[in-house]
Image (cartoon, helix red, strand yellow):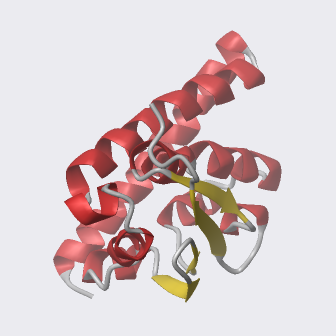
Amino acid sequence: MSDTAEKVAQATRQRAAVYAHLFKVLKTRLGEPQAIDLMREAIYNYGQDKSTKNYSPEARGGDLRQAAAEFASPDPVKEYQFAPRIVSESGDEVVIAMSGCPLVDEWRDMGLPADEIETLCRVSRAVDHGTWEGALGCDLCFEGTRGEGRSECVLRVKKRAGGIAG
């Protein structure tokens, strides 16, 4: 892989380390439930903001297939980090699998316990909820994640009946 892709992957791993340290501090000061809530809210908002800027008007306008194609794009950097692929699609539902996750890889390398990795994964995937639910008008369900010890993350995305919320 290119030097650029490796540098982006390293930046993602650094983000994972920041999440882990931030979670530890917030958990100590505020308790675990509030730490989770605050981090999820901020990360969700980032996902929503990112998708309003980085997705095409078609995707933001409710074209689920277009949104899925952009999410699972063949971009070499995204492929190197997350290896996303569309498993199945119809007009109102898409299933996407990702076999890589530099965040989980970093948390494992940091020696974090499995339950903390699972929690950090739940917190960090709020970015995807913000992307799909907030700005693209879909419902998102994770059907398994690498943070839970699975071999890949599986996302089921469905068109929301009312479209974009808010």
In the current view of this chain or complex, which residue is farthest to the front?
Answer: 162
Does residue 43 show up? yes
22 versus 81 height, above or below: above
Nearer the observer, 137 or 101: 137
User: Residue 149: which quarter of the image?
Assistant: bottom right
Q: Is residue 56 visible?
A: no
| Above/below status of 27 relative to 121 | above
Q: Quadrant of residue 55?
A: bottom left
Residue 51 position in % (x across, y down): 32, 51
Give the x, y percent position of residue 108. Answer: 64, 61
Quadrant placement of the C terminus:
top left
Locate the N terminus and report the quarter of the image it occupies.
bottom left
Left or right: 162 in relation to 55: right
The x and y percentages for residue 139 are 60, 54
At a point 46% along the width and 74% down the height, the residue shown is: 82
Tag count = 0
